[in-house]
Image (cartoon, rainbow, N blue to C red):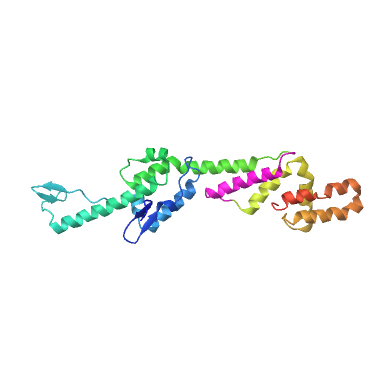
Amino acid sequence: MGPADISTDSTSTIKVTSLPKLAADGSNWSTYQDHVVNAIKAKGLRRHLLGTVHKPEDLEERNRGFFKPKTESPLTDDQLEAHENEIDAYEQKEAMLHEIIYGTVNRSTFVQIKGAATAANVWKKLQSIHANKGSMFEMDLITQLQTIRYSDGNSMRTHLTKMTELRDHLAEIGAPITDASFNSYIRTLLSLTPHYQPLFATLSTTARETGKPITSTSPRLASQRGSQQRGDRGKHQSCQCRYDRRTHQRLGFWL
């Protein structure tokens, strides 16, 4: 058994190295909590996490014998052995949960949560520190995704890469957004850019006329529509509908 393995019995082992580390800013709290709680439940330790398991009573030593509190009869050797085994089992599981939590947080968080009497209290302290940070971080990422702007002359590749990174980060903290929502963000934000406004106007018109939503094939349909109108509406209008092949290459995958 490696130093990062914690064994609950002869056949059950939790590998701390397989669990995610809690980010210092709590940004991945949702994902972290799901993994840790699931691992603990899988090993039958849920009651220790919730604090519903009771520690065996401490014995009193009197007249060279050991007594349970408020009793007059000393424990027999067999009773004493059984009681000590109960204490060992309880403390082993408590220590294991402490180590799981301590092993998945950074030093600063460890200092804040250490010293709690039970594993349940350690977990409650951790929740009080980080539970709200995850939702706040999620809202911040969504706000960035909703408000990011593309400026004419900047790199389109860099802009789309930044949006993709924000989407990936949301997925990492347990708040993924669908392809449809992500594509909607891209269309909405780029449609506010003067350079792309004619393109999105054409795509929207094409979608209405064909009765189909905007997809990666929409630029080709818009291009065909522009070609058909070229002979009827003159040079100026055909330019409005013509689809730039380079724009197709940059945006076709995302729309």
68 relative position to 173: left or right: left
Q: Is any part of residue 34 visible from this angle?
A: yes
- The answer to which of 167 and 250 lies nearer the viewer is 250
Q: Residue furthest front?
A: 2
Majority secondary structure of the magenta segment? Answer: helix
Q: The N terminus lies in which quarter of the figure?
A: bottom left
Which of the 4 image quadrants contains residue 126? top left
- The answer to which of 15 and 235 lies nearer the viewer is 15
Q: Is residue 172 magenta?
A: yes
Residue 183 drawn at (x, y percent) = 67, 50
Q: Is any part of residue 53 visible from this angle?
A: no
Q: How many marks?
A: 0
Q: Is residue 243 magenta?
A: no
- Check the image and report above or below for 213 versus 27: below
* Rendered residue at 65%/46% (across/down): 161
* Rendered residue at 90%/50% (across/down): 233
- The answer to which of 113 and 12 lies nearer the viewer is 12
Residue 128 drawn at (x, y percent) = 42, 41
Q: Residue furthest bottom?
A: 11
The stretch in magenta equals: 152-176
* Rendered residue at 52%/41% (across/down): 136
Which of the 4 image quadrants contains residue 191? top right
Residue 203 drawn at (x, y percent) = 77, 51
* Rendered residue at 41%/39% (across/down): 107
115 relative position to 197: left or right: left
Which of the 4 image quadrants contains residue 221? bottom right
